[in-house]
Structures are given as C-alpha cells and as structure tokens.
Image (cartoon, helix red, strand yellow):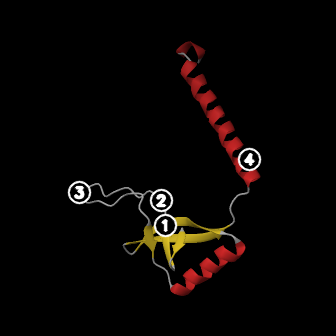
Amino acid sequence: VEERRGELFLVKAHIPPYIHGNIFNHDPERPRKLLMHKQEILKLGARVIEKRLTMIPLKVYFKAGKVKVEVGVCKGRQHADQRDVIVKREMQRDMDRALVDASKNRTRDDR
C-alpha cells in the first residue's frame, strides 16, 4: 500500500480480470485506489514516515457487495532476517524435491 498525494493505493497486487468481460477489461496489475477517511490516511502516513514503517494489506474480503482491504503497519525485515527466510525456503524446496523424486522412483515391488 502506497500513499500518493494524500490518497492510498494498493500496488503490485494481481486481481484477475472478469472472465465474462471483453477487450476493455482493466490491467490486472494496475494500482487500485483505496477509500479511507482523511484523518486515517494522515495518521497512517505519519506513523510510516516517523517510525520508518510500511503499510501492507493484511486481509481482503467482501462485505455488502464491496471489496474491503484491511491495512496494517509493520516494520520491514532486516537484511539478516531476509537471508534466514531465503535459507529456510531453499531447504524446504530441497526436501520437497527429494520427496517427489523418491516417490517417482518407487515401483510396485517396493511397497
């Protein structure tokens, strides 16, 4: 979520186009304007600037025919934390690959 000229926009979020639409469908990656009271925008913007925080969408849901986005303010990861996450993700991928390879190499006689 970014603040531009006193307005909030949801950016880098993929919202697929309407299936039954036509060639005039919107770009799925386009920035979406979020409606919020001016005081809420100012309060969130001040917290983001003074404490170097980031606004992120926490939850997206439907209510009364409208799409609602719950926005949260959080601190970004430090460089060392990010490396730990990457290492854990790579280890999980390696384990998943090993399991798939082991299951593909299994024959009926092995059971």
Q: Kindly give the residue lying farthest to the top in the view shown.
A: 109
Does residue 43 lie above or below 22 as drawn? below
Q: Residues within 10 Å of mark 1 (few under 14, many from 20)?
A: many
Dots 2, 4 in contact, CB < 8 A? no
Residue 38 horizontal side relative to residue 89, left or right = left
Q: What's the CA distance linking mark 3 and mark 2?
A: 21 Å
Disc 3 residue type (three-letter): Asn
Q: Quadrant of the N terminus?
A: bottom right
**Disc 2 designates what residue?**
13
- Between marks 3 and 1, how big is the CA–CA gap? 24 Å
Earlier-in-chain disc, 3 versus 2: 2
Instruction: Give coordinates of residue 31: x percent, y percent.
Output: 44, 65
Kindly identify the amino acid type of the residue bearing the numbered disc 1: Leu
What secondary structure is marked by label 4?
helix
Cα distance in 3D space between marks 4 and 1: 28 Å
Mark 1 and 2 residues: CB-CB less than 8 Å, in contact? yes
Please tell me in which quadrant of the rendered image residue 29 appears. Answer: bottom left
Q: 65 or 81, which lies in front?
A: 81
Residue sitting at the far front? 5
Q: Is residue 48 left or right of residue 37?
A: right
- Under mark 2, the amino acid is Ala
Residue under label 1, please give it.
10
Q: Residue at x 54, y 69 (%)?
A: 2
At a point 50% along the width and 78% down the height, the residue shown is: 5
Q: What residue would you read off at disc 4?
A: 84
- Distance, label 4 to label 3, CA atoms, is 45 Å
Q: How many discs appear?
A: 4
**Disc 4 or 1, which lies upstream in sequence?**
1
**CA–CA distance in space, label 2 to label 4:** 25 Å
Mark 3 Cα shell of 10 Å, populated few (<14), some (14-19), many (≥20): few
Observer-nearest residue: 18 or 32?
32
Q: Mark 3 — residue?
A: 22
